Image (tube, rainbow, N blue to C red):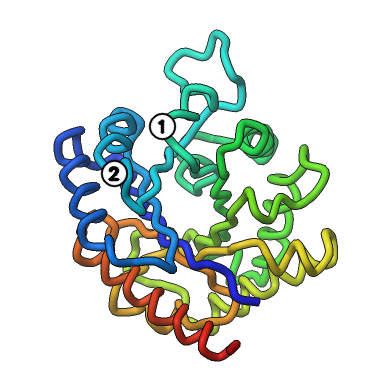
Amino acid sequence: MARTKLIAGNWKMNMGITDAVDLARSVADKTASNTDVEIAIFPTTLALASVSEAVQGTNVQVGAQNMHNETDGAFTGEISPTMLQSLASMVILGHSERRQIFGETNDFIALKVASAVSNNITPVVCIGETLEQREANETSNILQSQVIAALLHLKDLPAHDMVLAYEPIWAIGTGVNANPDQAESTIAAIRNFLSTRYGSSAADALRILYGGSVNPQNWEDLSSQENIDGALVGGASLKADDFAKLVKTSSSITDLEIDSLV
């Protein structure tokens, strides 16, 4: 099944407002001719409003890097989904850094996912295993448990209102990425698991991204895999030229997929 590819740039805790706006405008300019790949950038919360304004009217969407599940209340320092609605169409949830550094649990992430969906913000839900877990052949169990937990408060799989991102923790920011066969087989297994629980139609429609040291040099091989529907990009998204190359590569792959279906 052909799914629109999504190239999403997670800027993490980088750049102040001025630099973020400059990068956002550059990304929009360099990808303006793109018509068949979805593009999203995820700046820091501080820069959300300015970046959203800077790319208004372009083909670049803006997402948030985090949010609380409650819409209001005594949660000092947090940002609610209702606050994000006018600024972001997507939000990254369950990233390994949130899980490992900030202690976010599966239960908390599940509440956030349900809150995002109910507030019409597309959650990009991250799942991934450590190197130790992979070497112990625990990858499938870990990923399945994370997926089950993330969907705990949803009746069905919101295939068109949600994105999964497989980010093996051992490949994030290390310069080592899963090879195409590893990434494809793991994501195919995730999709097959979802199919057994929610039916093949929903599982086939859901976009599953790959993340983990994605760059213009390795993306063509990764992007051409059947079950990889895009990328959640870290360091390469901080350079407009590199990010634009990822979009261009995905667009070329998408053209090939469409031609093969005609």
Task: Residue at 67% x, 33% y: name it.
Answer: 118
Question: Which residue lies at the image location 84% right of the left edge and 66% below the top edge?
Answer: 196
Identity of the residue furthest to the top in this view: 74
Image quadrant assignment for residue 72: top right
Q: Secondary structure at mark 2?
A: loop
Q: Of the residues shown, which amino acid type is indicated by label 1?
A: Leu
Q: Position of residue 251 (x, y in %)?
A: 39, 75
Q: Quadrant of the N terminus?
A: bottom right
Q: How far apart are the alpha carbons under marks 2 and 1? A: 11 Å
Please say if 128 is above or below 179.
Answer: above
Count how many numbered circles sit on residues in the image: 2
Query: In the picture provided, is 192 more to the left or to the right than 116?
Result: right
The residue nearer to you, when weighing 204 against 231, is 204
Q: Residue at x 23, y 66 (%)?
A: 242
- Pick whichever of labels 2 and 1 is earlier in the sequence: 2
Identify which amino acid the numbered label 2 is placed on. Val
Q: Which mark is residue 87?
A: 1
Residue 111 position in % (x across, y down): 67, 32
Q: Are marks 2 and 1 in contact (CB under 8 Å)?
A: no
Q: Which percent across, then down, holds residue 8?
A: 41, 56
Residue 38's x, y, as percent?
44, 60
Q: Residue at x 65, y 38 (%)?
A: 117
Q: Which residue is mark 2?
A: 55
